[in-house]
Image (spheres, coloured by chain):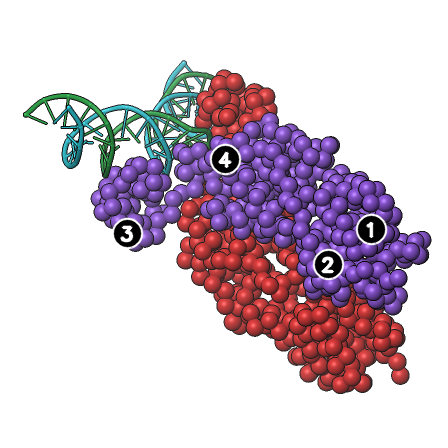
Chain colours: A red, B purple, C green, D cyan
Amino acid sequence: MVTISDVAKAAGVSISTVSYALSGKRAITASTRTRIEAAIRELDYEPNAGARMLAGATTNILALSAPIHADGHLPTHMRFVTAVVDTARKHDYDVLLLATDDDVSGIRRVAASSLVDGVVAMGVKNHDERVDVVRRAALPAAFIGIPGEDGHSGDGVACVDLDFELAGRLAVTTLAEAGHRSIGVVGHPPTYLARGTGFVQRFNLGLEAEAAARGIRIAVVSPTLARGAAERAFDELLDASPEMTAVIFHCNEPVVESVLRRIRERGLDVPRDLSLFAACASYDTSHLVIPLDCIPLPLDLMCRIAVESALRQVRGADALGVELITPVTENRGSVARPRL
Amino acid sequence: MVTISDVAKAAGVSISTVSYALSGKRAITASTRTRIEAAIRELDYEPNAGARMLAGATTNILALSAPIHADGHLPTHMRFVTAVVDTARKHDYDVLLLATDDDVSGIRRVAASSLVDGVVAMGVKNHDERVDVVRRAALPAAFIGIPGEDGHSGDGVACVDLDFELAGRLAVTTLAEAGHRSIGVVGHPPTYLARGTGFVQRFNLGLEAEAAARGIRIAVVSPTLARGAAERAFDELLDASPEMTAVIFHCNEPVVESVLRRIRERGLDVPRDLSLFAACASYDTSHLVIPLDCIPLPLDLMCRIAVESALRQVRGADALGVELITPVTENRGSVARPRL
DNA sequence: AAGGACTGTCGAAGCGCTTCGACGATGCGC
DNA sequence: GCGCATCGTCGAAGCGCTTCGACAGTCCTT
């Protein structure tokens, strides 16, 4: 193992000079710096992580708390994980993945042992135990999603999320302005709500508020993930409201795909017979059998903001508070004026 | 922060006694041990990770090199990651996720800085740069997949994989013994092979050898992931060989699903008109539209073996060599004797 | 009863780094 | 040309832990 003193010897300086050259915390003469850098390259020196953690204040590791749920959508989950890792690496941070069932004890453990500088938490629930843990440990933390019963205070921790309430309004507005007066909604499985994922509530809130304000009829179904459940729910939706001219999807890709197939089977033409809109889509809607107008879930942006918020806290800023991302729509031709 | 000396003070012993009580490397009187354990619980002590790394030899962290490919199957990828994390946790190890493009430099970095004790590598290619890196760094490592051009030597590193060659034989054997004489194969996209993923080659090798030995006709298609490509490839397969009575899937779930739908559209009855067999399935074949007989990919077992091999190497064993898992078949009723 | 082999505990060294205070060298104003 | 900042570098302390050697005390063995 090559250590800082090897570098110091090779460059003919003391180890503290090497350390300062590395950290930039004190001025170093250009010529000295050059010699040190040459020695580092020559010897292929990499600072020892343990020593750095022990002596310095930081570990350059971020924990990612990513609990897996039975009803979760694995590809989306993986995209979040990858985006967090990518952003962290850009800031010279590594990511320790906490993905076993017992997430709370994992955070407690890595925090107590000073293994990580901070934590990014995915899969946030209304009543999220992790909030207490990070607050008690005074651990820099950023939540992807908004904890807290009220859905907007953030429970005193830093969090970032798409503005789902606004997204709900925007989805309705988009269809309303195209002339639709009766809209169906295919939502997430009921287990999501039961688990306390706030974004479903917030989306529904915005949806209903906007619909009420505009006097638009809304009917929501929340199919389970069982085979055929989505198609049946969709049939129900349409058959119960023959005047329905548009459907909003607020669900995962597999559900959307099976409903799209059902739409084809029923011989419906999109958008002439039925307008479709994918709200908060974590997937690419342009590759679907029927490309869909959508509000994309800005997954990369969310992860970037979360990681950077956590790192700002590591640097001492109290970057708390809720950051809401304004939803935008993308056009793929699946929304049009209803016939007649 | 509560340190080992706080615990020592509280228990009325020296810090080395606490350390030995914790590690079990020297005998400690029962009464002393009890007092120390009480103090630890009382103070909620957790050893400092940095200090432990620096003083001890190990970090209790494993790197997981999990490069993401554009054509990869995200859910499968995520299942591997989760399985590795779970197994590692069972051995009191944490997992550092290396998932950015430049995987080789990541391994080099964490190894050089002694951040991790070892590495588990997924997404192994025939000519895998990571082999050189871990060998040069003498880093304990386990590959999930078999590196090396020849497909079975393992290139001098520890690796574990399903015995894909045997799986290929087994798939053919299963269908041959049911009386099929002409079999189609829907394989992975051509980009897999181009990338140098050995398991595709090994599977095909076994497949062809067994077919040749039994005088069975084999036709392979490798559809791209483009929409409709799988269905078209399947049509081609069947139309080019009207005598074909069985199809083997060696591909990801979405491909299987679209072919299964095509099968329904064509009005084929499984298994009366066509027998189906899913080889090395990383997904649950019992939940498909048509449940499929299969050889499951023993993903959890593979990850367990890999993690444990890496940890055995950490403990000093030279647990190198190739571990092949014998494939087994599962029956779901999608294979039967061909008509006539 | 004396010697030897264990047992259980302790003190101290040292892991590789960061950072503080010290200090010679240099440049400035007067 | 003197004192005074400023600059660049150094030595040493200390981060919290593991582990080695030392050493009382205990228990056999002879």
Residue A48 appears in the figure: no
Q: Give the spatial CA distance, label 4 vs label 1.
A: 42 Å
SS class, disc 1: strand
**Quadrant (top left/top right/bottom left/bottom right) for the C terminus of chain A:** bottom right
Label 2 and label 3 in one chain: yes
Please identify, in this view, whether the residue under mark 2 or under mark 3 is nearer the observer.
Answer: 2
Is label 4 in contact with label 3 (beta carbons under 8 Å)?
A: no
Return the x and y of residue B232 as percentages of the image width and height: 89, 56
Residue B214 appears in the figure: yes
Please identify, in this view, whether the residue under mark 2 or under mark 4 is nearer the observer.
Answer: 2
SS class, disc 4: helix
Q: Which residue is mark 3?
A: B38
Protein chain holding label 2: B
Q: Residue at x 82, y 55 (%)?
A: B179
Q: Which residue is mark 4?
A: B314
Q: Give the spatial CA distance, label 1 vs label 3.
A: 63 Å
Protein chain holding label 4: B
SS class, disc 2: strand
Q: Which residue is mark 1?
A: B185
Q: Give the spatial CA distance, label 4 vs label 3.
A: 31 Å
Protein chain holding label 1: B
Q: Which residue is mark 2?
A: B293
- Mark earlier in primary sequence (1, 2): 1
Q: Nearer the viewer, residue A196 or B154?
A: B154
